[in-house]
Amino acid sequence: MNAIPREALSKAVTGTGSGATAARGLPVDGFGAAIKPDAKCALIVVDVQNGFVTGGALPVKEGEAVVPVINKLAERFENIVVTQDWHTPGHASFASTHSGKKPFETTELSYGTQVLWPDHCVQGTEDAALHKGLLLPTAQIIIRKGFHKEIDSYSAFYEADHTTATGLAGYLTQRNIERLFITGLATDFCVAWTALDARRAGFEVYVVEDATRAIDMNGSLAAAWEQMSANGVKRIQSSDLA
Ligand code: VGL
Ligand code: ZN
């Protein structure tokens, strides 16, 4: 798939009538929210699961704070995709699977360096369940990922071997969806990898910063924003959406 032409971006933008606004696809003045989601837009809600909030197996600081922000955004979207980290017991991304390894250390797997995590989001467990506070009545599909025992998947598009597809790009393309607004957990892992793969697949991509929270280990959050920005991912706030 080719990259979406820049002009396509302006179609998602209404409001102030400012040429500068339309060209950059971002609100640039004080006249209020400028981005109005339409049928070609989807809200992507990444891994808002018990495992990633307070009390979970891999808690992200203030992870639960994204829930009301996402619920409010959801009212504006007719298309919503939810993702769920969905690991096998003994998954290759778990430190406990590798003797002598502790969580947050790394190991080499067939596809490269893998950060090792506490056991989290095991299929069918309460830790893997979606946060009960999520209110997403128009959500149409749940993409589960990380279910191959030997391959992790931060991205909702491609697993960490960069080869195994989840099917999400095909789903979005067949639904004629072109612009993605990505939210959820964690900014520097599953959100960032999803946003970068979405760009590679040719989608116009916004990350809604205040609808995300980060793990932020060893500078990973700053690095993620840098990489996203270098690849054309737009960083916005929930107040930028009409
Ligand atoms: C995630 C680490 C391991 C995430 C998932 O959702 O960002 N991070 N598994
Ligand atoms: Zn995981």
Image: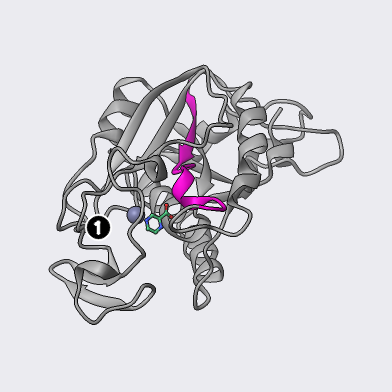
Return the residue nearer the eye: 36 or 82: 82
| Side of 67 relative to 157 (left or right) | right
Residue at the spot of label 1 = 160
| Side of 135 relative to 139 (left or right) | right
Check the image and report above or below for 108 versus 51.
below
Q: How is the image coloured?
A: one colour
Return the residue nearer the eye: 223 or 107: 107
| Side of 89 relative to 236 (left or right) | left
**Residue 205 visible, this orientation:** yes
Which residue is rendered at x = 43% and y = 59% of the image? 189
Q: Which segment did they paint magenta?
A: 40-55
Return the residue nearer the eye: 120 or 157: 120
- Image location of residue 166, percent across then percent down: 24, 39
**Residue 202 visible, this orientation:** no
- Image location of residue 77, percent across then percent down: 56, 22
Q: Is residue 52 magenta?
A: yes
Quadrant hosting ligand 2:
bottom left
| Res. 152 image quadrant | bottom left
Image quadrant for the C terminus? top right
Tag 1: amino acid: Ala
Image quadrant for the N terminus? top left
- Image location of residue 6, percent across then percent down: 50, 40
